[in-house]
Image: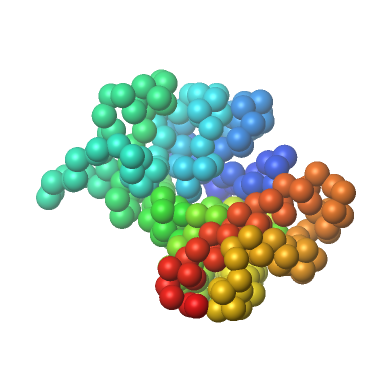
């Protein structure tokens, strides 16, 4: 576990994803969880060594970071996700003057067991403490995926970006809104308030350096896929781009074609390139 600022910590899980926690004088907020339930229980025990306060909420930077068993292991009061995570459900629109979140209908709540979900549309805040307050702000972004968010510790300069930003490996493009995603990264690079980015994967660091790592891959992949689209090549031909991109952007541990890591990451990369192909084709890049 690494300390970022006062009572703000993050940990890298066995599969390389970053999770975080913010410890207030009255409660704790977690940011994402290990997908492995056993690792989630270990993470809960580590947090318990720092504070015996209850976990008020687990905020998920995107719904693909959530595992029901891991969530149950945290014994949290609530799970916070963007409402696009439940786009398949008919959730009533928020009336004017309502709080910036709402509980989901009973059938969906049951899916979460003892941890009720709370959703929001644009932004919400969780306040920890009484004498010494900490504001944990959750803001919708929607670049990496339709329900992806940033989590900011107000006045600390720290932002948990989820998989909008990854360092040391290519990002997963399979659900991306690429125009929006690149705008988000460009704005993050220019941001003078943020001092520390905790990426979805990779070490925490300066916003410009972290954002550029992801932006460079998106631009590089776009150039290559756009050439295929304009040449009216079939979508399946994006697979030919994978070895070159893996050699340029994959971590050294995943560059051996016979390794399980290469298989997993190259499969994810191909799915992302296929999605990028479809997006560019829909935009009339041919």
Query: Where in the figure is residue 163, as x and y percent of width and height?
Result: 56, 55
47, 175: nearer the viewer: 175
Query: Where in the figure is residue 227, as x and y percent of width and height?
Result: 61, 78
Residue 172: tell me if it is visible. no
Q: Quadrant of the N terminus?
A: top right
Residue found at x 35% / y 47%: 84
Query: Where in the figure is residue 262, as x and y percent of width and height?
Result: 79, 51
Color theme of the render: rainbow
Query: Where in the figure is residue 275, as x and y percent of width and height?
Result: 53, 59
Residue 55: tell me if it is visible. yes
- 7 with respect to 86 (left or right): right
Q: As displayed, is residue 194 above or below residue 265?
A: below
Query: Which residue is at the far left?
Result: 96
18, 106: nearer the viewer: 106
Residue found at x 45% / y 63%: 177
Residue found at x 61% / y 71%: 233
Q: As displayed, is residue 244 above or below residue 255?
A: below
Residue found at x 47% / y 66%: 279
- 210 with respect to 182 (left or right): right
Q: As displayed, is residue 179 above or below residue 116?
A: below
248, 77: nearer the viewer: 248
Q: As displayed, is residue 149 above or below residue 103?
A: below
Residue 216 location, quadrant: bottom right
Q: How many marks?
A: 0
Residue 113 location, quadrant: top left
């Amino acid at each position: 576990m690494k300390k970022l600022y006062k009572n703000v910590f993050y940990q890298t899980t066995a599969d390389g994803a970053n999770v975080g926690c913010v410890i207030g004088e009255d409660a704790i907020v977690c940011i994402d969880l290990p997908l492995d339930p056993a690792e989630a229980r270990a993470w809960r025990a580590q947090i318990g060594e720092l504070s015996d306060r209850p976990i008020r909420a687990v905020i998920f930077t995107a719904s693909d970071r959530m595992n029901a068993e891991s969530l149950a292991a945290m014994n949290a009061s609530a799970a916070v996700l963007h409402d696009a995570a439940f786009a398949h459900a008919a959730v009533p629109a928020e009336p004017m003057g309502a709080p910036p979140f709402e509980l989901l209908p009973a059938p969906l709540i049951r899916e979460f067991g003892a941890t009720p979900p709370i959703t929001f549309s644009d932004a919400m805040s969780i306040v920890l403490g009484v004498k010494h307050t900490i504001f944990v702000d959750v803001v919708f972004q929607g670049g990496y995926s339709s329900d992806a968010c940033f989590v900011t510790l107000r006045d600390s300069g720290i932002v948990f970006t989820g998989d909008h930003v990854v360092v040391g490996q290519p990002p997963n493009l399979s659900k991306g809104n690429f125009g929006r995603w690149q705008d988000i990264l460009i704005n993050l690079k220019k941001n003078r308030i943020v001092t520390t980015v905790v990426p979805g994967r990779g070490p925490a660091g300066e916003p410009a350096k972290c954002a550029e790592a992801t932006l460079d891959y998106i631009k590089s992949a776009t150039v290559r896929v756009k050439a295929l689209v304009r040449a009216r090549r079939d979508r399946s031909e994006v697979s030919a781009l994978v070895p070159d991109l893996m050699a340029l952007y994959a971590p050294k541990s995943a560059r051996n074609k016979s390794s399980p890591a290469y298989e997993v990451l190259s499969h994810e990369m191909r799915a992302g390139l296929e999605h990028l192909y479809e997006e560019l084709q829909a935009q009339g890049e041919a």
